[in-house]
Image (cartoon, helix red, strand yellow):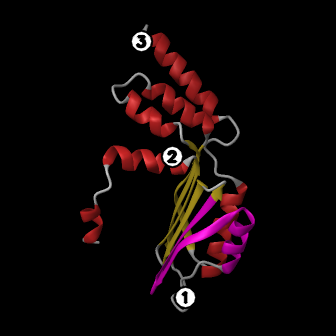
Amino acid sequence: MKTKMLAIILISFLGACFLPGCVFVSSDFRHTKNLILDEIGPADVDTEVQIQIGPGIISMGSFIVSFTDARDEALKYLRDIRNVQVGVYHLQDVDRSRPIKIPDKIAEKLARKGYEPMVKVKERGSAVWVMTKMRRDRLQSLYVISLERGELVLVEVEGRLDRLIEKAIREHGFHKGEFMNI
């Protein structure tokens, strides 16, 4: 019985990996990375992580989790996530004479996709943007860009994020005192 279950899980996982929108990040995501890297000038780039977790892998994760004790807890969160793309890039030999900034072209590109800036932070040697996409007054997508001299991190999460955040706050609480010390 265990061998049969393991075979089903393995076949399902391999099948999910070859579905469109799974594992490999989108060309649009890679294009965003390349625009940012062009802005900072020549640098050695080492890709630490670059992955897309699409509907196929999320469904596979839901299937696997359904056999665990955390089934109910995990499934209610996984239902609201449609797609996740993550890229972490280590940067070496970045030109120190050029300022670290996220190009305006990125804001324009993301605005055409429906994203609006939520937070933009610029400090010496780093920049962070958090962009959101709303649909009928509901948070549909979140795009985070973090750039430092030694690292670029891109994260895009799509789904019913307003419901996801609401569940997390409802179940784990929102304690005013936790944010007073920040």
**For mark 3, does the 10 Å Cα neighbourhood hold few (<14), some (14 to 19), or many (20 or more) residues?**
few
Give above or below for 120 relative to 176.
below
Give above or below for 152 relative to 55.
below
Query: As drawn, is 143 to the left or to the right of 31?
Result: left
Three-letter amino acid code at disc 2? Arg
Secondary structure found at label 3: helix
The C terminus is located in which quarter? bottom left
Mark 3 or 2, which is nearer the eye? Answer: 2
Extreme residue toward the right, this view: 112
Extreme residue toward the top, this view: 1
Q: Point out the tag, 3 or 2, that comes first from the N-terminus.
A: 3
Q: Pointer 2 and pointer 1: residues touching (CB < 8 Å)?
A: no
> Is residue 41 visible in the rendered structure shown here?
no
Q: In x, y percent, where is residue 169?
A: 38, 50
Q: Is residue 120 covered in magenta?
A: yes
Residue under numbered circle 3: 2
Three-letter amino acid code at disc 3? Lys
**Image quarter of residue 72:** top left
Q: Point out the tag, 1 or 3, that comes first from the N-terminus.
A: 3
Count of labels in the image: 3
- Picture residue at 60% right of the left edge, 80% below the top: 40
- Picture residue at 54% right of the left edge, 92% below the top: 97
Secondary structure found at label 2: helix
- Picture residue at 70% right of the left edge, 68% below the top: 111
- Picture residue at 46% right of the left edge, 35% below the top: 76
**Magenta-colored span:** 104-133
**Image quarter of residue 35:** bottom right
Q: Point out the tag, 2 or 1, that comes first from the N-terminus.
A: 1
Residue under numbered circle 1: 99
Closer to the camera in the image, 115 or 11? 115
The N terminus is located in which quarter? top left
Q: In x, y percent, where is residue 172?
A: 32, 47
